Amino acid sequence: MFETKKFLQVLGISILITVIVSVILGFIKMENYLIFVTIQWLMTYGSIGILSAWWMKKTPYFSAYLGAVIMALLNMLFSYFIFNIMIFVDPEGINRSLSWAVIIAMTTSFITHYLIKRTKGQPV
């Protein structure tokens, strides 16, 4: 059964991790923008996958998928309304963003779920 409260906690912690990683990378003065964004992406969507596998035992993959889609949409809306980046005129960019978000979240969720099952000695 899907647990909405835990799902919202996963999203909240993922947003908090994104802010903390951004501040740390800002203090480091990351020169390469591509590395900065890649680290943020991996931390944000990876944390969604990991936390979904830990907390949502019955629906880890659906939670990771839904969390990645919601977080990507929140990022797009934030970019559009706060920074005035016309992201919605580029459908290929939206597709690429959503695809990578889901791939990262689902992969980390699968790996974490697999490792949890292996450490408990349960069949995979």
Image (cartoon, rainbow, N blue to C red):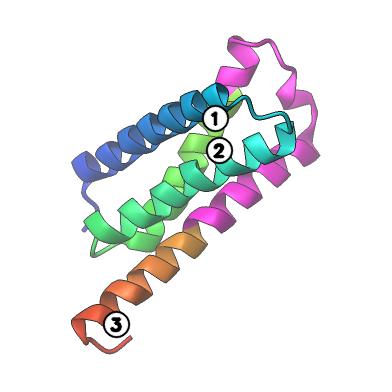
Q: Is residue 51 above or below residue 77?
A: below
Residue at the (72%, 24%) spot, across then down: 87
* Comes first in the chain, label 2 or label 1: 1
- 10 Å crowding of disc 2: few (<14), some (14-19), many (20+): some
x and y percentages locating residue 62 in the rendered image: 39, 57
Q: Is residue 4 above or below residue 109?
A: above
Q: Quadrant of residue 60?
A: bottom left
Query: In the image shown, does 112 or 6 lie closer to the viewer?
Result: 112
Whether the residues at callouts 2 and 1 have beta carbons within 8 Å, the answer is: yes
Decide whether the magenta segment is chiefly helix, strand or loop: helix
Q: Is residue 26 above or below residue 66?
A: above
Q: Quadrant of the C terminus?
A: bottom left
Residue at the (55%, 52%) spot, across then down: 102
x and y percentages locating residue 12 in the rendered image: 32, 32
Residue at the (40%, 48%) spot, across then down: 48
Does 80 appear in magenta?
yes
Q: For mark 2, what is the residue?
A: 40
x and y percentages locating residue 19 in the rendered image: 44, 26
Q: For mark 1, what is the residue?
A: 25
* Comes first in the chain, label 2 or label 3: 2
- 10 Å crowding of disc 3: few (<14), some (14-19), many (20+): few
Q: For mark 3, what is the residue?
A: 118
As measured in the structure, the alpha-carbon distance from the residue carrying label 2 to the one carrying label 3 is 29 Å
Q: Hey, what amino acid is under mark 1?
A: Leu
Q: Is residue 62 above or below residue 36?
A: below
Q: Quadrant of residue 89?
A: top right
Q: Quadrant of the N terminus?
A: bottom left
The boundaries of the magenta stretch are 77-105
Residue at the (21%, 49%) spot, across then down: 3
